Amino acid sequence: MAGAGVAVILVGHGAPPEDFPAARLQEFFALSGRKRGDAAVLSQWLALDREIREWPRTPANDPYHAGLAELARRVATESGFSVRVAFNEFCGPTLAEAVDRAVQEGFGGVVVVPSMITLGGSHSENEIPEELAKVRAQHPHLRLVYAWPFDPGSLARFFADHLRKAVGGA
């Protein structure tokens, strides 16, 4: 996959914005457990999900969103790739929306990489692959790579270096 025609999508978990109305957020979570098999409840839940995802984000009301955006900027600088973000929940864009935008912008390849780096997480192991299966069906000619799992040796070296800096700087 050549670099120039490739978009990278960094997928993060997502968090509700801190200034989203608490009562609406409680309603969202209450509906979450009841949405299966009830079309009216699902419709309500989907509307709230969209409202939460589209809530305006700032570093003050969503430091996680700002942190992932900063990481994406730094990955772009280090790699030379066009890097954008997507979120599993609570924030937009979704992974499917981010892929759609990359395709609309003319990218012929997309590499998806989660910010969740360890094995055993439902987002990286299950939800993202399920979403990518749907994306592949919608974009059958797109070169789509899921850059996961991470090499445990590389992660161990990363953490060891980080720990050495922390201990050395103490």
Image (cartoon, rainbow, N blue to C red):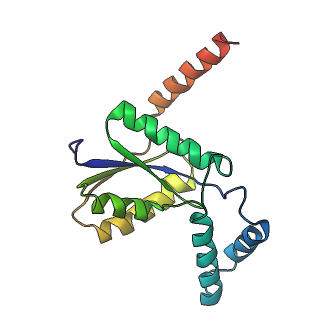
Q: Residue at x 70, y 77 (%)?
A: 31
Residue 22 visible (yes or no): yes
Q: Residue at x 28, y 58 (%)?
A: 105
Point out residue 16 in the picture as x, y percentages from the top left corner. 66, 58
Horizontal arrangement in the rendering, residue 28 relative to residue 10 (left or right): right
**How many tags in the picture?**
0
Point out residue 134 in the picture as x, y percentages from the top left corner. 38, 69
Q: Quadrant of the N terminus?
A: top left
Horizontal arrangement in the rendering, residue 124 relative to residue 4 (left or right): right
Point out residue 58 in the picture as x, y percentages from the top left corner. 62, 50
Q: Nearer the viewer, residue 133 or 40?
A: 40
Residue 116 visible (yes or no): no
Q: Residue at x 74, y 72 (%)?
A: 24
Q: Is residue 38 above or below residue 136?
A: below
Q: Residue furthest top?
A: 168
Q: Nearer the viewer, residue 120 or 88?
A: 88
Q: Quadrant of residue 136?
A: bottom left
Q: Is residue 30 above or below residue 162?
A: below
Q: Quadrant of residue 28?
A: bottom right
Horizontal arrangement in the rendering, residue 87 relative to residue 137 (left or right): right
Q: Residue furthest right?
A: 23
Q: Nearer the viewer, residue 11 or 48?
A: 48
Q: Is residue 113 above or below residue 139?
A: above
Q: Residue at x 65, y 50 (%)?
A: 62
